[in-house]
Amino acid sequence: MKRLLALFVVLGIGVTSVGTAFGATLEDLERQLQDLQRQIQQMKEEKQRQDQKLREVEAVQAAQKEEVKKEAASLREQARRVSSELAERVKIGGYGSVRFESNSLKEQSNTFTFRRFVLTADAKPADPMQVYMELEFERFTQLELERKVQPMGGGLTVEEAIEGTDGSEISLEQLWFQYDLYPWLKFRTGQVLVPLGRFNINHDDNRWNIARRSLVDRGVPVLPVKAAWPELGAGFLGDIPLGDLGKLSYQAYVINGVALDAEVEKVLQARGGDTQKLELEAKFSPSRGTANLDMKDSKAVAARLAWSPFPGQEIAGSFYYGRYTPKSLSDESLFAFAIDGLTTIGQFEIEAEYVNTHFRNVDRVARSFGQVAVRNEAENESIAGGLEAEVDFELAGLARNKHGFWIEGRYRFWPEFLTPTVFGKYFENPQLVALLRGEQVWLNGLIRAAEFENGVLTNLDQENRQLYRVATGLAYRPTPLVVFQLAYEYTKTDRGRSLAEVTNFLPAQAGEDEAHAILVGVAFGF
Amino acid sequence: MLSRRHFLTSLLTPAILALAPDLISAQEGVFLDEEEAPRAVFPEGTHFEKKVIPSTEDLREKMRGLLGRARPSIWEDAYVTYLARRHGERLGFAVIAEEIGKHRPITFVVGIKPNGKVKDVALMVYREAYGGEVRDRRFMRQYHDKDLTAPLLPYRDIVNIAGATLSVQSIGRGVKKALALAQIVFLDGPGRS
């Protein structure tokens, strides 16, 4: 730039000199030179101003860039903090289990069963508050609904198709809010597990070492409703330290409670003759209470009190009391109580539960049911259509009294020679668990059939049954959350009677009164 | 006629529901704050000197060497420790440690005697949905006099709490971690006094 200016000056001088030669005065030349110098100075100043402006603009731009960078970093940090707080506040977990079973039954000798997958979420809206949810998918792989509404043949056609897998169930096992007022007083409301016995409140599959739940809690069940049994209600729970005497823990709830509820079954039967059969069966059995309107308009109460004199030792008593009939039937109550416990001696544990359930005035309920349902069976044969229709009303799962127990002994050990193998080297405390479980159930006054005509009970067939089961096995627990289960089980009911009549899981044929089974399962939690 | 059941339920329902709003003060999960922690394991202490020990890679490596098969689920950035004294006499060290239970960290303080054995353990914060029984003093008493050679595992030398096995295992791991830290920093290392 300086060189350009110098050249400019020299050229100016040269041009001026030539002018002088043509008669210009020295003063003129001097004036012109000063003018030129002034112009150059002005140009220099102008350039400096422009440079200064440019620098200012660049500085502003740089500052803006820096600001944007800072903002972006702050936003990133905020997002990280929010997601980390959210992750801290809400925890997703769950458990699942599958089983392979081979048994001696004629109907079904072996099968894989997807027992269940349960998704859990545990959130803390604030420090003393907690929300917990368990959503269960049992034997569930598919549910699909198709519906089509279209005009056809001058009328309207509505088509509906439901596709699903056998035995599938989706269930909200728990959904409660808890406010911890004190360690001894916590308020809980929502869909809570009924504290009757110890299994229902500790039912996660990965906590147990045999790949089948007990008869008392599930397979018969003796519990008014099979586990896991939640009910909608509210109540309190807590722990009360007793000093040297140990600790008391309690749970007490007011809940909607068990009700006789209908389950509608449709049977389509192709037959050898000239008719087909459509059978509709409304089966009324004790079911968990509704989450909508309480059809009994009467609440139930359930409570459990456990005393733990030392760590690893617990004995508990619990009860359930409430109406079990809907308003449309006579008002009858259900009372159940349970005694359960756990004792640990070194590596050896014994855990047990006894449950006794009494449905009051079952015969009166059957009579009352007959009055409402009018006829237990109605048939209608439409010759033109070649279709025979049958509607059945049935009382199921009701007995005057059900009681039973299970007792399980476990011995945990770990042979050191397994430590360097794949079964041991990745885990901190792997265990093998040898176990033996015995169970027995008595069903007194079990309703086999209730027949009624024109609103009058014409026949109530009841019987006393019993059932027992012995299981032994070995489980491998690489970590507390995962278990590989192997067990042999033997189940037996009254001689010459079918196991299917007294259990809800064995597809035994008439007269099949015993079953041998090998169970292999995996249960995992996370 | 009011049946016994109706009487019972109509009495209990409002009683239970009415109790809730009046009981506002709460203390869920947080049982001790940092200031109270050393006193919980050294109640006879008169003076507690706080020392924060940064968790360097070198320190972690040394601790791993002492932990054996125990694998900590958390490596803290720094350890808050206290030297407990009673009128000048050294009682031991309190180390605040954390371990993940099932999903959330359990925070607790471990009191360690000058001979490297556990004096006491106390739960500071429990955040899990289940398994809070580990805060019982009688459960924590099982750790008394244990040292780094003990397995500190359920069904081995610690009685398990049904339904809280993960928490029991975590506390054992955390106690070992505290013992290892005390061994390196206070008993063998520069913090020895």
Image (cartoon, coloured by chain):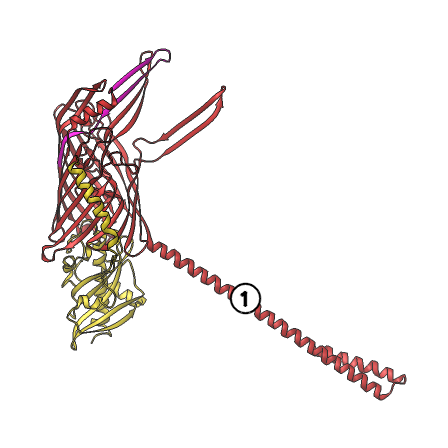
Chain colours: A red, B yellow
Residue A446: image location, x then y, percent? 15, 27
* Subunit of label 1: A
Mark 1 residue element: helix
* Amino acid at dot 1: Gln
Q: Is residue A137 magenta?
A: no
- Please identify the dominant SS of the magenta region: strand
Q: Name above or below for residue A335 compared with residue A38.
A: above
The extreme bottom residue here reads: A26
In the rendered image, the quadrant that contains the N terminus of chain A is bottom right
Residue at the location (24% across, 54% down)? B22
The quarter holding residue A118 reads top left
Residue at the location (54% across, 69% down)? A63
Task: Tell which of A353 and B32 is nearer to you.
Answer: B32
Residue A259: image location, x then y, percent? 23, 33
Task: Tell which of A507 and A448 is nearer to you.
Answer: A448
- Mark 1 neighbour class, 10 Å CA radius: few under 14, some 14 to 19, many 20 or more: few
Q: Name above or below for residue A485 compared with residue A22.
A: above
Q: Is residue A378 magenta?
A: yes
Residue B56 visible? The answer is: yes
**The residue stretch that appears in magenta:** A376-404
Residue at the location (29% across, 32% down)? A167
Residue underneath mark 1: A64
Q: Name above or below for residue A520 compared with residue A458.
A: below
Residue A391: image location, x then y, percent? 29, 20
The quarter holding residue B45 reads bottom left
Residue A477 visible? The answer is: no
